[in-house]
Amino acid sequence: MPVLDLCRLSVSDAWLYALAVIHCPRNLDEQAKMFVRFQNTLIRHELNKPKPDQVPIAEWRRDQAAAGDNKLDERDNKRASGARICAIMFMQVLVYGGSLRSVVKELGKTFGRVPSTCWADWRAFRPAAHLEAARLFWPFAPSDLGSFFAIAEELRRRGEAHVLPPPGERLLDPAETWRVPECISLPPLPDTFEMPPRGFFVRPGNFLAAPDPLRSTQARYLSCSWSASNNHVMKRPHHARSTRTDRRPE
């Protein structure tokens, strides 16, 4: 199974990397490009804040030039919508049981979602469905990225253990689902974790919209964590060594 390369990432970069994996779980090259687009979007967000007393003008111009024009586009918004649909399908089956086919049928009735689109989204984003579900359905403190990954890992374990109706396929395939590396020591599940999530429901216009992934909760988190970009996301055991199983965006 693919392993999230979190061991050497800062707090802000770890969140950007998780977003890149959510939106490009199967294509590492596209994942790396999206990671850069997220970084550049965040840089612009920070540089556009008035900080004349904190950032020398020469450094400000240099960083703005480095950000370039490589920003989020319409294709990224479509990926956000697809990842969201996949997470909804995952949670509906995990919480209520039944088959993916019945969930796709319900999405068609409720949202007018074309079945072929739902199945395409499921195939494309399934390896990171637990990450997007944790991001969508559970609140966590902006500085507590460890709780986010702890919830995602619990969902991964449950998804890999959940057997669908015949032919008996697993809801999440252990061979392709992204997981946290063993070198990361995660905190216990937060008190906010419960199944189903508090207030869990899906309604038209709620999760099918595809806003810029850096807006809303994650945008506020990134803003407050920017100054702490040299702090690592979670603790590593002192004896653990970082073994790179998968590529990380450079």
Image (cartoon, helix red, strand yellow):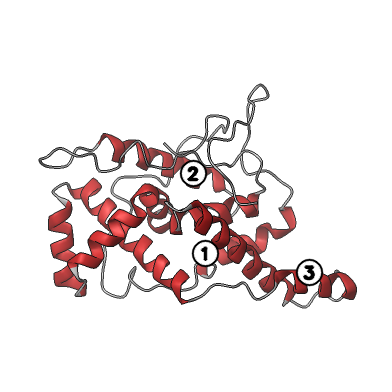
Q: Which of 233 and 196 is in front in this view?
A: 233
Residue type at numbered disc 3: Asp
Q: Residue 217 carries which label?
A: 1
Q: What element carries label 1?
A: helix
Q: Residue 149 carries which label?
A: 2
Q: Which of 16 and 204 is in front in this view?
A: 16
Q: Which mark is residue 63?
A: 3
Q: In this view, does 247 lie to the left or right of 130?
A: right
**Label pair 3/2, CB-CB below 8 angstroms:** no
Of callouts 2 and 1, the N-terminal one = 2
Closer mark to the observer between disc 1 and disc 3: 3
Residue type at numbered disc 2: Phe
Residue at x 37% of width, y 47% of height? 127
Residue type at numbered disc 1: Thr
91 lies above or below 242:
below
Q: Is residue 197 left or right of residue 245?
A: left
Residue at x 53% of width, y 55% of height? 29
Q: In which quarter of the image is the N terminus?
A: top left
Q: Where is residue 245 in the image (x, y as percent from the top left)?
A: 53, 35
| Mark 3 closeness class: few <14, some 14–19, many ≥20 residues within 10 Å | some
Q: Nearer the viewer, residue 222 or 58?
A: 58
Spatial distance from mark 3 to mark 2, Cα to Cα?
Answer: 30 Å
Q: Is mark 3 on a helix, strand or loop?
A: helix
Residue at x 57% of width, y 33% of height? 184
14 lies above or below 157:
below
Q: What element carries label 2?
A: helix
Residue 114 appears anywhere in the view: yes
